[in-house]
Image: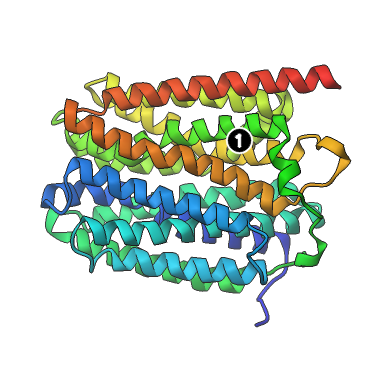
Amino acid sequence: MRRMSSSPAALALGGLVALAAAMGIGRFVYTPVLADMLDAGALNGAEAGYVAAANFAGYLAGALLAASPLLRGRRISWMFGALLASAATTAAMGLADGVTAFAVLRLAGGVASALVLVFATAIVLDGLIVAGRGGLSALHFAGVGAGIAISALLVHALKGADLWQAQWFASGGLALAAFVAALLLVHESVPNAARSSFSAGGLAADRRLVALMLAYGLVGFGYVITATFIIAIVRANPAVVHHETAVWLVVGFSAAPSVWLWGRLARRIGVLTAFAAACVVEAIGVLASVASAGAAGAYVAAVFLGGTFMGLTAMGLAAARELPVCGGAQRDGRRVVALMTAGFGVGQMFGPALAGALFTHTGTYTAASALAAGGLVVSALLAAWLSRDLARAQ
């Protein structure tokens, strides 16, 4: 099928649409819908954590699948297939009943969202680099924030404990429309054959990349508890319950320009130093979500979370692609993205399950959020160490 445009701007816009559908909607719409599901009794607090963990387990599985040399075929075919699967599993949540069915669908949706992230990012970044328009990558990554903001408005329009199924149906329909738009915009300008040779064993032995993967995994653990439960936290507080839609909108609006803003800072102070700074900012936001009883804490959390998590995602992937390679071999961009995403997936898989279990015993998300903030601080320290290690090696 011939695409409407092969321009770098169209490619980046297509990437934005793909990430908005698979990540901003398919992955994150669970957060605002969850509050109504809890009110309706469709899930309890612990079950909500397990369902979220299933999604992130699927995300991990999808990242590992994308990294596997056994995965054959064109990258763009996998991307579009996963994008369609993301829309289908999102809509099917409105038909499901019971924690097992919810978990299975979110597991499948997690696989799809990871495949879209890995393949769309590889296709878009490769195409932009070839065209000499790497700066447009910020437009691609803005898709997650755009999807979060749009889904917040959609869920608010259908707000109500008896409308959570309709929220899933509408979200799936919106994701399907985005699939059609991406189909018209995204093409593969760099063929699979142009990708460099890759040794998984050599990559695993690279201590710097392992350290970066660990830091990235801690970011996954650190952000996900607040990202999953921030609306439930707000709704549980009578003083700020009427702010829940605005809080999730602020997360999305803060995320949309964050990659561009953190990219500018990274060019000034170095990508790993900027990564460490973003971890500290996000840790403050995570603590703010549970440390304040007023609206200020919720909005600080929304701005600091939204303003960092996609910046950290992009900077982590950029740092991995730029790391010097042991032995002088070249890295395969797709598999570097996939393995980093897998490390991120390990961290975020445990976060919701831990938060749900601790909520069952304590009735709050405070302990889990404190652990998450601690993980982000450790991630910042790892990134700072890696930055100094690279500086000494030069």
Does residue 357 sit above or below 163 in this rendering?
Answer: above
- Residue at (83%, 21%) from the top-left corner? 393
Foreground pick, 303 / 1: 1
Give left or right: position of 363 versus 135: left
The residue lying toward the viewer, choosing from 243 and 267, is 267
The image position of residue 12, as x and y in percent, is: 64, 57
Q: Position of residue 210 (x, y in %)?
A: 65, 33
Q: Position of residue 238 (x, y in %)?
A: 13, 31
Question: Which of 109 and 18 lies nearest the eye of the viewer?
Answer: 109
Q: Is residue 352 left or right of residue 373?
A: left
Which kind of residue does numbered mark 1 sit on?
Met
* Residue beneath the point at 61% across and 41% down: 314
Quadrant in which the N terminus is drawn:
bottom right
- Residue beneath disc 1: 213
Q: Quadrant of the C terminus?
A: top right
Category of crowding for the residue at label 1, using alpha-carbon neighbours closer than 10 angstroms: few (below 14), some (14–19), many (at least 20): many
Q: Is residue 291 above or below residue 74?
A: above
